[in-house]
Amino acid sequence: MNLTTKKRLNDGREMPIFGLGVFRSKDGEETYNAVRYALDAGYRHIDTAAVYGNEASVGRAIHDSGIPREEIWITTKLWNDEIRAHNEEAALQASLKRLGTDYVDLYLIHWPVREEQGYLRAWKKMEDFRRRGLARSIGVSNYHIHHLEDVLREAEVVPAVDQVECHPELTQVELADFCAGKGIAFEPWSPLGAGKLLEDPELLSIAASYGKTVAQVILRWGLQRGFICIPKSVHRERIESNAQVFDFELSAADMDRIFALNKNARVGSDPETFPF
């Protein structure tokens, strides 16, 4: 397993298991440099979203890297307001323009918008985007089990990915097991708990025993659960350090020690009550 390792999705496509997230990376130099640092370090997977406001910087960095487009996996997401406005087609076209590409590798519904059964109606649009090749793979984000069950009852295409908040204080065991049973790849966002877990005494103890950082231990825990990991950073040294997770393996006992940190505590909004 290494930075180029890929996971076969339920649509037959192969997605890199490790990537760079750019949530809250400032548009312009900050995001541009972070993507260039990641690509220089061997990353081939970048995760952005329309609402992050930095797709153009991601696209420019990918273009300037000189790496062939087909070697880089790009994920972006359909924002809630576009679903409410029935504006899915224009939203995707705008994302493609900002990214400077004629397709994305993975397009996700960002949140399960309820109005007018929005997330169910939008899924039909997503299936159309996939048929037309605008989105090679399609999936969802922030979907709980009941949201997925709703989609699966009507879907022609099973979501390839569910991207949700998941970290040692929100282990998401039941949801991850459900996704595994349906062949849906599980992709944590905020895998480091927005940084607040980096000083946790238990994690510091585990990290010291392996000669690794807490971030590396948490990311390794996710990889050993079979997840796709997309840690966010804008610092070259951290981007490089985060990727150094393929040269060790956590013991079963240490995996359990990390699972025991679960508090069902979120750093982001709850998909049942999100206010946007």
Image (cartoon, rainbow, N blue to C red):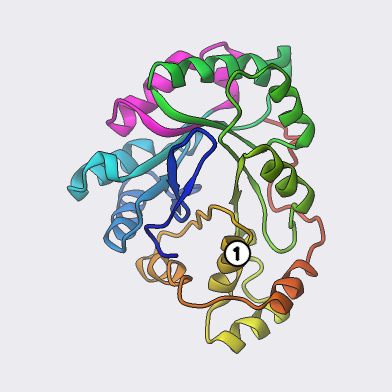
Question: Mark 1 sits on what residue?
Answer: 224
- The answer to which of 196 and 106 lies nearer the viewer is 106
Magenta region includes residue 233: no
Look at the image and tell me in which quarter the N terminus lies. bottom left
| Depicted 11 relative to depicted 113: above or below | below
| Depicted 69 relative to depicted 38: above or below | above
Query: Which x, y percent locates residue 157?
Result: 57, 23
Side (left or right) of 238 relative to 40 = right
Magenta region includes residue 83: yes
Kindly identify the residue that appears in the image at 65 percent across and 66 percent down.
Answer: 196
Q: Residues within 10 Å of mark 1 (few under 14, many from 20)?
A: some
Query: Which x, y percent locates residue 11?
Result: 50, 32
Query: Which x, y percent locates residue 177?
Result: 74, 48
In the rendered structure, which segment of residues is drawn in magenta? 79-108
Side (left or right) of 64 relative to 188 = left
| Depicted 178 relative to depicted 192: above or below | above
The image shows a total of numbered marks equal to 1
| Depicted 89 relative to depicted 160: above or below | above
Look at the image and tell me in which quarter the C terminus lies. top right
Kindly identify the residue that appears in the image at 19 percent across and 46 percent down.
Answer: 64
